[in-house]
Amino acid sequence: MVQESIERDILIKMYKLMVTSRFWDNNIDDMHAKKQMIGMSPHSGQGQEAIGVGGCLALKEEDYMVPSHRGCAHAITKGLSLKRLTAEYLGKGTGISKGKGGAHICNPKHNILGVSGIIGGALLIATGVGWSIKIRKTKQVVMDFFGDGMASQSDFYPALNISAAWKLPVIWVCENNRVQQFTHFEDVMGMENIADMGKPFGMPSIIVDGNDVMAVFNAAQKAVNRARKGEGPSLIECKTYRWRPHYEGAPETRTVEELEEMKKKCPIKRLRSYLIENKVITEKEANKIEENIMVEIKDAAKFALESPWPKPEELYEDVYV
Amino acid sequence: MVQESIERDILIKMYKLMVTSRFWDNNIDDMHAKKQMIGMSPHSGQGQEAIGVGGCLALKEEDYMVPSHRGCAHAITKGLSLKRLTAEYLGKGTGISKGKGGAHICNPKHNILGVSGIIGGALLIATGVGWSIKIRKTKQVVMDFFGDGMASQSDFYPALNISAAWKLPVIWVCENNRVQQFTHFEDVMGMENIADMGKPFGMPSIIVDGNDVMAVFNAAQKAVNRARKGEGPSLIECKTYRWRPHYEGAPETRTVEELEEMKKKCPIKRLRSYLIENKVITEKEANKIEENIMVEIKDAAKFALESPWPKPEELYEDVYV
Amino acid sequence: MSEKTINVSDAIHDALVEEMRRDPSVVIVGESIQRATSFGITRGLLTEFGYNRVWDTPIAENAIAGLALGAALTGLRPVPIIMIGDFIPYAMEIICNEIAKYRYMFGGNFKVPITIRVGAQGAGAGLAAQHSQCLEAWFIHVPGLKVVYASTPYDAKGLLKASIRDDNPVLFFEHKFLGSITGTIPTEDYTVPIGVADVKREGEDVTIVAWAFMMHKALNAATELEKEGISVEVIDPRTLYPLDKETILQSVKKTGRLIIAEEAPKTGGIGAEISAMVNEEGFDSLDAPIMRVAAPHTPIPYSAALEKLWIPNVKDIINAAKKIVT
Amino acid sequence: MSEKTINVSDAIHDALVEEMRRDPSVVIVGESIQRATSFGITRGLLTEFGYNRVWDTPIAENAIAGLALGAALTGLRPVPIIMIGDFIPYAMEIICNEIAKYRYMFGGNFKVPITIRVGAQGAGAGLAAQHSQCLEAWFIHVPGLKVVYASTPYDAKGLLKASIRDDNPVLFFEHKFLGSITGTIPTEDYTVPIGVADVKREGEDVTIVAWAFMMHKALNAATELEKEGISVEVIDPRTLYPLDKETILQSVKKTGRLIIAEEAPKTGGIGAEISAMVNEEGFDSLDAPIMRVAAPHTPIPYSAALEKLWIPNVKDIINAAKKIVT
Ligand SMILES: Cc1ncc(C[n+]2csc(CCOP(=O)(O)OP(=O)(O)O)c2C)c(N)n1
Ligand SMILES: Cc1ncc(C[n+]2csc(CCOP(=O)(O)OP(=O)(O)O)c2C)c(N)n1
Ligand SMILES: [Mg+2]
Ligand SMILES: [Mg+2]
């Protein structure tokens, strides 16, 4: 497929965001291993960064986004600060959810809806957001990221059905890594591709290489344009790989060879080579970018570590308005 | 479509069963109007008789069947006695569910599973029956009847998905009358046909004229054979019409003209003409069949009316084994 | 203030219409509410407010709740409708794991102004085990939700308005046999505050707490008991969470005796919570055991002959009162 | 009879293995139980029993329950697994409207031998609002279900076996922090009857009813209280429905005081039912208010700093006991 040309600053943004996502994941895994982070083991997004980044770069500030439970690529691309993200994972009062949510991050300022811990419901929440946009006639769109496992939950069906029946401005983005915790796609799924599920509803349903951030971005842009014009939802299935176990410390059900093979398709290395080959940036610039990001990550970690815990009375706050 | 030839005695059975179903529906509506039947208003199956009859005639005694909530065609074809059916609707102790279920009939002797009052769950129960057959390796099949409305419930998706992924011996038969209580198909459904939903799963998914009992029978036979051979599920969408309101006494949302048009496609008249034209039976024989059936219906009604109510202590029985 | 006579069903209908007129962000969504409806409450809404405010869904209750949540988070004030109470199990995921927790889990970043109208609860219409339940007890156990259940036209209209205006998720339950019950209401706009009980009848000897259709049975029982010299105070909590403990505790302080009458199976019902609360916080007031009048631990039978035995009735309340007032 | 030491997790694992060996109609089905598992309980089952008896499903909890029901009606004895208790809302429709009612609504024509293993309930692991709940209270309110919750290896093994052999639907709850708790069990086959409570410690001054992980906190509290001269009787109901009322009532008759300790939010919990039952049936035994030690009415917070404040602990039980024993 010929890549539609993407502006230089977007390409560089892509690189920065993917590297940020990768480094942040690495860092939070470290902090978890060192028990600096106590609580739910991180569900690393390593290997899948191109999807959240490519998808969210196709959105405008006012568009809504529902992140998946894996990694932070979506949220940071949509604008969530690394400091408040990290603090939230550490359960600190400065976290974006005041420490009450942990990995269940959000950011209403950037129209980032919450990450639910439940595999399924978010599909219907996203449908509701699309419905609300249609009612309010605001020309926004909503992009919803979910795994292939979430695409097996019963809610996926009414979400597709309703979004199609009412032509809602929803972009369904499936991150198909072919694993669902310790279950493999082929053992439980009756279809070849998740994209096949969009077809009965006549919605554009395409498969992209989820490790190719430019391909994801281009597909997302098309879907976003369509949605914004009121032409209804699209389904984008991104084929990708989960590098880490389901969560840090979880059993691994795939072979070492498989994992090695996957890592060869690293979306970050791929973009880096492209950028250097096409003289978008030099190797030195790339390294510099990485160095700067590492500093940011460390700053965020420091901020989080030094942040205070929520106060005891906060336990009782935020239940009701 | 050329009809595959169907044996004479099956054709006659079809006629008898469809007439029985029609007359029984008429009679229970009458009894309800006369307050001889107290309780949930009947959900008449008039106009849809060809589906339950054609489908169930393709089954063997030992096969399982899950009826829809509309009419009695499925249950009587699979062997439920008119007496115990009628008594159940009247809430009598002689009813097939001892008066505890009413329209929620069943008959384990004929492997008729229960009619749930919930639109959805039965799809998963049928999946479970198919799963059980596969585990027990009995060469049975299960046929599940459901409306287009039930096909919009979230459960439809895992039911299709799991039956396909595991190649379960399930025959999904949708009675698509394009109404779901007071909602019309086109207002809420994102697909053209229910049969489209089988395609992502690679299961044979066909559309038949649901008012043509022979077409339903032939399609059901193919699906049953396939399932029995272990080749997996099929989806048969039967296009049909609901003649009566959702339940007796419910508001009607369709025009009188529409309803008149539908009635022209009466599945019983159609079979009757075919049988007479093709000299399977004479007009006189057809009339005689109808007379006999009317006697049977009246007998069943008498039995039900004269049957005793359940005894007060039965309230507490059958909660636990 | 002028008044008019109205039944519960019309009061609910009017509350919906008035709130939709008052606030353009109120939208309603549910099964079969556009073209016709079984219970009449949504009649005329489509004509007045059009397709952009009145939505028919496929049969997918979790989706109805999910649509509402997505909309509530993005500026609307939805009123999702669960046609019949028994269908709410399908919506448990969104209601209990998402709607109830959204504000808390995301650190107060969101408001969740949703009123879930749960329609047509209750036995007595011969609809069998899956169309007759009263399931409100599940929801008082779920932090983040409010639970409202009105028994009169006045309360129904005032509480539905208060629920819709509330920025929290509220479950507003309705009962099949309340629709036709009449009463007077002001013609002017008014609300009934969430969390405030109402003493429907004053009395001295025994307090009966009852809501929804059972409240009317409690009033009937009170009239009968009066004849036998037993003076009954009837309290309608109106809101089941947050419960107006004070009104109940004050009453029990006066009467020394408490009966809770509810239509659901006794075990694990709302009556259990009220009994436990009074024991904990008003033990010294109690002169007799707290009695619960409730349904037996069986699914609801279809047969009219059995169903009438299942439903807790006026006689059961009278017997309980006689037993503890001696 | 010879004995061995084992933890709860292994006891449950062994019960499953032994029942699967004993009865070829026992099959298990759930999410991620074939290749690996988070909690280890299904380890080795696939190897021993093969793909025909151990099934991985897609992520669709209502489907897991539905598969089980279809199978139970047609000759199998399935053990569906809900991986983490918080996911059970997805399965409410099948569990509460179909499984619980199938036998009754169809006039006793069917048996429904299903044991739903509800895994990994409970707070304390930093898993936030949707992976930490104890939801057992909902199910005692649903006629047709039995509800079992064991706290020791002995009870867990014996009750799981009894549940699997029972011809009724049983919810068998498990708690995250029970898995590693050890105890001795017979090496021979045994069962623990459903519906029978166990006095885990005898005492004179106050009765504490507690189950699952709270039972162990109650025992710890009892040890502490002993030092201060308060003698505590600890009862583990083990089955929450049907409840062994007699054992609880007898104990309260002796002690005159009752505390119910549970991990869920207080309002509408199991404690409410037990309190109301004792009030109704054992009022004259009570010398003090029945206290409930339970969680506050908030979703469960993620932050370790807040979560530990949310969870009812030993100190809370001790304080409650001191308050009523004076
Ligand atoms: C309703 C529900 N069931 C089960 C789980 C447990 N669970 C968490 S993540 C997960 C797998 C999700 O797979 P997928 O959607 O493919 O995302 P991936 O982890 O592969 O990125 C499961 C089963 C859950 N959180 N919610
Ligand atoms: C979970 C649930 N939601 C809603 C209903 C109410 N209801 C009963 S039948 C019906 C329509 C069913 O439509 P369809 O499946 O097309 O069958 P038809 O009545 O057209 O034969 C509805 C909405 C129900 N019984 N269960
Ligand atoms: Mg996956
Ligand atoms: Mg229909």
Image (cartoon, coloured by chain):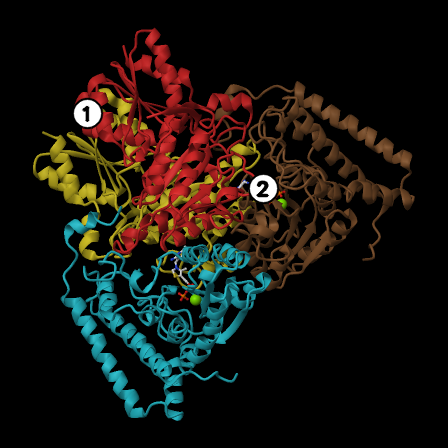
Chain colours: A cyan, B brown, C red, D yellow
Residue C283: give its label. Answer: 1
Nearer to me, D285 or B200? B200
Please determine whether, in this image, residue A61 is positioned above or below residue B140: below
Please determine whether, in this image, residue B207 is positioned above or below residue D232: below
Residue drawn at (40%, 75%) of the image: A54
Q: How many marks?
A: 2
For badge 2, the amino acid type reads Phe
Q: Which chain carries label 2?
A: B
Q: Residues within 10 Å of mark 1 (few under 14, many from 20)?
A: many
Please determine whether, in this image, residue D326 is positioned above or below residue C204: below
Task: Please state the horizontal and vertical placement of residue B225, each as a whole percent of the image.
Answer: 71, 56
**Does the beta carbon of the residue at mark 1 sit less than 8 Å from ligand 1?**
no
Residue at the left extreme, as displayed: D228
Task: Please state the horizontal and vertical placement of residue C216, each as a whole percent of the image.
Answer: 39, 21
Q: Quadrant of residue D201?
A: top left
Residue D92 visible in image? yes
Residue drawn at (50%, 51%) of the image: D63
For badge 1, the amino acid type reads Phe
Residue D187 visible in image? no
Left of C110 or right of it: where is B31? right
Secondary structure of the residue carrying numbered label 2: loop
Disc 2: which residue: B182
Q: Which chain carries label 1?
A: C
